[in-house]
Amino acid sequence: MHSRPRIVIIGGGISGLTSAHYLHRRLGDEVQVTLIESGPRLGGKIATVPFGGHTVDVGPDALMVRSPVVATLIDDLGLGDLVVEPNAGGARIWSRGKLRRLPAGTLFGIPDRLLPLLWSGLLSPSGVARAALDIVLPRRPGLKPADPTIAELVRPRMGAEVFDRLVDPLLGGVHAGRADELSAHSTAPDIEGLARANRSLYLALGRRRRAAPPKTGGAALVTLRGGLATLIDALAARLAGDDIRLGSPASLITRTGDGYTVDLADGTSVEADAVVLATSAGVAAELLVAESPELAATLADVPFVDVATVCLAYPRAAAPAELHGTGFLVPPIEDKLVVGCTWSSAKWPHLADDELVLIRCMVGRRGDNRWLDLDDDTLVDLVHGELVEAMGLTRRPVERHIERWPQGMPQYVVGHQARLDAAATALLTLPGIRLTGSSYRGVGLASCIVDAERTADSLAALLSGDRPLTEVAS
């Protein structure tokens, strides 16, 4: 190992950039970082574009700041004055022909109060009555299989309607997936823990609510004035002394002595003492296949879904009334193209506009590729038609922006933790190789940032001569 550790980071999204940031925090400026990004810009799925006279995020549009790691990062980058909290009002669900307010007292859609659920109209009266049966149903003898889906935990206790019209749109919407395929352990560990430890989900949630300390501080989800690209710009500015290579896809990683050689598609190569793969699991598999076919096969098993963001700007008069709330989610059972919709100009104070209503819709979820081969005009027509049905819009959009994200969302389906454990074992034969990003331990930006810090801590311990931290997935 050289006196100045050489680290190659592959992937210039939030995971790669924050990995570099934390490595400098741990090892100082002596560490030599080369960041390789296959695309023409940094940021990955964080993308901010001019739209409707504003700057609008067409990838993720919010950041969870309840995590101390994320809050500290924002302060460290000097972005605290740019934080914007969303307006109040909450989300709606498009269910049974109407946009209906999400009832108070739910955890990932599981209710802990029956009257707000009844008043919401989200469920039929019989669906509410079926949910109430959870209070008296006997304890299940044991959760089988060992890695149950969310559906296997919720449906037997609270019935199909709670699952189809509350849990599936909320959890499935976050992951662009189907909650009857998603691993509860990997996507909703709180639900799994409650189900394993309690007879009734409803009663357990009530006890949890009553025991919880009063909420303090600001909103859990925020954005930044100017869009989340502001965060990317701030991170890039901190890495100004590093070797950042845009438009340089990596093609292969091979072991050379005590380190690694990273070959690039342009025929050049970079030597490294350690490599951070901040890419999708599929890309990591292709890069590692020569050194560890077993690891590559494990990573290649992580499924992904194509998604797209459709941003539409409407004249203010097109909306029949003032929008109250932040947007709505659509249960898969409704068989709509739109998965979720954000009323951006109502949700974010800095995007408020007297002339335009700014709306961003997500399309694409596991098992629904109807939109994939549509041209932009047809896709906009179909999305607009569903917004007319849901919201009563009376005019066509006056501006649009479509961002397609091929293989954009990893799916933590049943067996995800077993894949992480298998990858951790395989990585023990590749000291200095680390995996981080949304493919592994959380799809949200906050989860990626937390995992990047963990990755940097692990490599810093290895490169500084301390006892190496193993890549045990948790």
Image (spheres, rainbow, N blue to C red):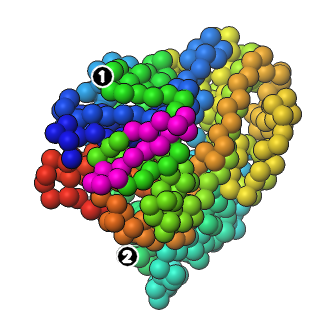
| Residue occupying the point 85% across, 29% down | 377
Q: Quadrant of the C terminus?
A: bottom left
**First in sequence: mark 1 or mark 2?**
2
Q: Main secondary structure of the magenta part?
A: strand
Q: In this view, does 68 lie to the left or right of 250?
A: left
In this rendering, the answer to whether 136 lies above or below 430 is below
In this rendering, the answer to whether 139 lies above or below 116 is below
Q: What stretch is highlighted in magenta?
A: 256-270
User: Is residue 262 found inside the magenta-colored segment of the image?
Assistant: yes
Q: In this view, does 152 lie to the left or right of 271?
A: right
Which percent across, then down, holds residue 81? 33, 18
| Along the viewing direction, whichever of 80 and 95 lies nearer the viewer | 80
User: Is residue 141 found inside the magenta-colored segment of the image?
Assistant: no
In this rendering, the answer to whether 432 lies above or below 33 is below
Which of the 4 quarters of the picture holds residue 429?
A: bottom left
Q: Is residue 208 left or right of residue 368?
A: left
| Residue occupying the point 66% across, 22% down | 358
Classed neighbour count for the residue bearing mark 1: other residues with Cα under 10 Å, few (<14), some (14–19), many (≥20) = few
Foreground tag (1 vs 2): 1
- How many numbered marks, from 0 up? 2
Which of the 4 quarters of the picture holds residue 244?
A: top left
| Along the viewing direction, whichever of 128 and 414 lies nearer the viewer | 414
Which percent across, then down, holds residue 31? 23, 35
Which percent across, then down, holds residue 87? 49, 28
| Residue occupying the point 50% across, 39% down | 264
Does residue 221 appear anywhere in the picture?
no
Q: What element carries label 1?
A: loop
Measured in 3D between alpha carbons, the distance from the residue under mark 1 to the one under mark 2, in whole angstroms, is 51 Å
Return the mark for residue 80: none
Q: What residue is pinned by disc 1?
A: 241
Return the mark for residue 197: 2
